[in-house]
Amino acid sequence: MKIGIDLLWLRPGKNGGTESYIRNLITGFATYDDRNEYTLFVSRDNADSFNSYTRINPGIRLEICPIDSSNRIRRIAWENLNLDNLAKKTGVDVMFIPVYSMPHKKRSNGIPYVVTIHDLQGLHYPEYFTKIRLGFLKRKWKYASEEADRIVAISNFTKRDIVENYKAASDKVITIYNPVITGESAPISELSKWGLKAEDYYYCVSSLLPHKNLYTLIDTFAYRKKKGHEEILVISGVGGESVAKAELVKKIESLGIKDNIRFTGFVSDAERNLLYQNCRAFLFPSVFEGFGMPPVEVLMIGRPTVTTEKTSIKEVTCSKAIYVKDPFDIKEWSDAIDRAVSEDREFGLSGESDRFKLEKITREYLEIFESFSQSTDADRS
């Protein structure tokens, strides 16, 4: 059968964990599936970033559409007006939409849709969104919940959220965890470019979005410094210059911990793995995640991890981390950090890591796609 994948939305280097998710998954299809063909619907400005998959598997081809991913309004309009017809024209048997934004589906074309919904954060923290953005998200979540033939949720937490809020049938929503690929690490000598030594720092991967709760971690290190701890917190993922970063830096300076906080900006996967492997402990203060990739990645490497119990985090980390019950309590955070570096225990996902393996997850998606092959064949006969 021929599987279509909508990638018109992807802006290379701009979509964070969602980009890692879909690139890992396409790697899985290219590596483990020699039965089906794939048409990747790409935009003019992201097509080059997908060429490598066509070399891995000759069953993968690109369909370059006359839009740019960077022009969101035009792209959404084009998708809704044209994508379903183009999928029909190119012989697609099933469409896979890796994000919530399912385009308009023409029932007369008869193409089944599989849509991944990563989270419904806007329902829990509406204050983090503009009214226009939140209204758009709610309409898209509702449309996908009603019109998609199958919905993939990336955690059981997200599945419950979809079923409870949009009344989707439970058997229509299937939980498939994100594939986690840690990959190679940069050489340890590269720590020196940040002025670091092995096990001489704590590490956090975060953005400045409010739900990441980074300010609590900053306050925790100020609290610990007053208690006599001279420690380094390294933060990756906060890059460039922005009003939000300027405010964070101002906060750090006002607390007197400027020398204790180091920003790496955005790092490569190999650099991130190096920082994972050599930290004293990994700290992840987020209060909302549909999945939460960083703590899973670092636990697969086997490093001490402190995080929260919120939303999906305890589920996907398989109860293997140290958990803070109140994510805003700096004393509880400080105590948990002390436990992470002093307790005689092993951190890791031994016995649990198979659930995140790329081959297993690839086959779970293929099972969904191929479940439509009989009905598609019947329609054509």
Image: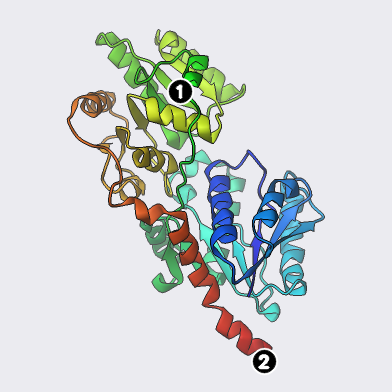
Is residue 47 shown above or below 112? above
Can residue 208 be seen here? The reply is no
x and y percentages locating residue 66 in the rendered image: 82, 55
Of the residues shown, which amino acid type is indicated by label 1?
Ile
Q: Nearer the viewer, residue 56 or 2?
A: 56
In this view, the residue in front, 307 or 327, is: 307
Could you tell me if residue 44 is visible in this image?
Answer: yes
Looking at the image, which residue is at 42% across and 39% down?
294
Left/right placement of residue 101 relative to residue 314 reads right
Q: Nearer the viewer, residue 253 or 365?
A: 365
Q: CA distance from mark 2 to mark 1?
A: 60 Å
Q: Which mark is residue 381?
A: 2
Instruction: Name, please, the residue furthest toward the left.
Output: 344
Q: Residue 266 at x, y = what percent?
A: 56, 29
Residue that mark 1 sits on: 188
Badge 1 marks a residue whose secondary structure is helix
State how many labels appear: 2
In the current view of this chain or complex, which residue is farthest to the bottom? 381
Seen at 35% across and 17% down, the residue is 200
Percent position of residue 83, x then y: 73, 65
Q: Is residue 58 above or below residue 123?
A: below
Q: Amino acid at mark 2?
A: Ser
